[in-house]
Image (cartoon, rainbow, N blue to C red):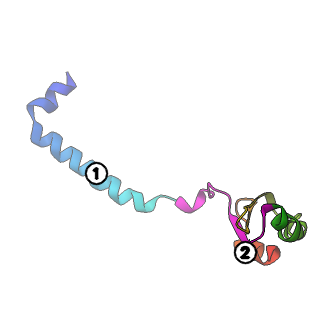
Amino acid sequence: MIARFFIDRPVLANVIAILMMVIGGIAIFALPIAQYPPIAPPTIQVTASNPGASAKTVLETVALPIEGQVNGVKDMLYMQSTASNDGRYTLLATFKPGTDLDKAQALVD
């Protein structure tokens, strides 16, 4: 019944659709986006290189001292580290959402 009204008057249907798009475009700028929390937790990556060293050597000489210092940093959720046979070491520290990354990086360094 109501659909027939708009089928018989396509210009009116198009004007209403365009008007709704314009109102939606204006309303998008009024949305309080700052109220929503960040979705992904902030992370800090620490890398080290020991050229020519095996993964075991990198683990013993680089990874263990770094992880010992980083362990227990305020607001840190977890750490993930990798050591490769080409002498590269990477530590990824994940923090609680809302943590100031500048302060967290100062604590990790």
How many badges with numbers are in the image? 2
As for residue 71 lying within the magenta part, the answer is no
Cα–Cα gap, marks 1 and 2: 59 Å
Kindly state the secondary structure of the residue where label 2 is placed: loop
Where is residue 67 drawn, in percent x and y?
Answer: 86, 65
Q: In this view, does 50 lie to the left or right of 26?
A: right
Q: Quadrant of the C terminus?
A: bottom right
Kindly state the secondary structure of the residue where label 1 is placed: helix
Of 61 and 36, nearer the camera is 61
Give me the residue at 10% from left, 42% from top: 11
Most extreme residue toward the top is 1
Residue type, mark 1 in image:
Met
94 in relation to 70, above or below: above
Q: From which residue to which does the magenta span run?
A: 33-55
Q: Quadrant of residue 87?
A: bottom right
Pointer 1: what residue? 21
Give me the residue at 72% from left, 74% from top: 51
Pointer 2: what residue? 51
Crowding around mark 2 (Cα neighbors within 10 Å: few <14, some 14 to 19, many 20+) is few
Where is residue 104 drawn, in percent x and y?
Answer: 77, 72
13 in relation to 38, above or below: above
Give me the residue at 62% from left, 58% from top: 38
Crowding around mark 1 (Cα neighbors within 10 Å: few <14, some 14 to 19, many 20+) is few
Q: In which quarter of the image is the N terminus?
A: top left
Q: Is residue 24 left or right of residue 1?
A: right
Q: In this view, does 65 lie to the left or right of 48?
A: right
Closer to viewer: mark 1 or mark 2: 2
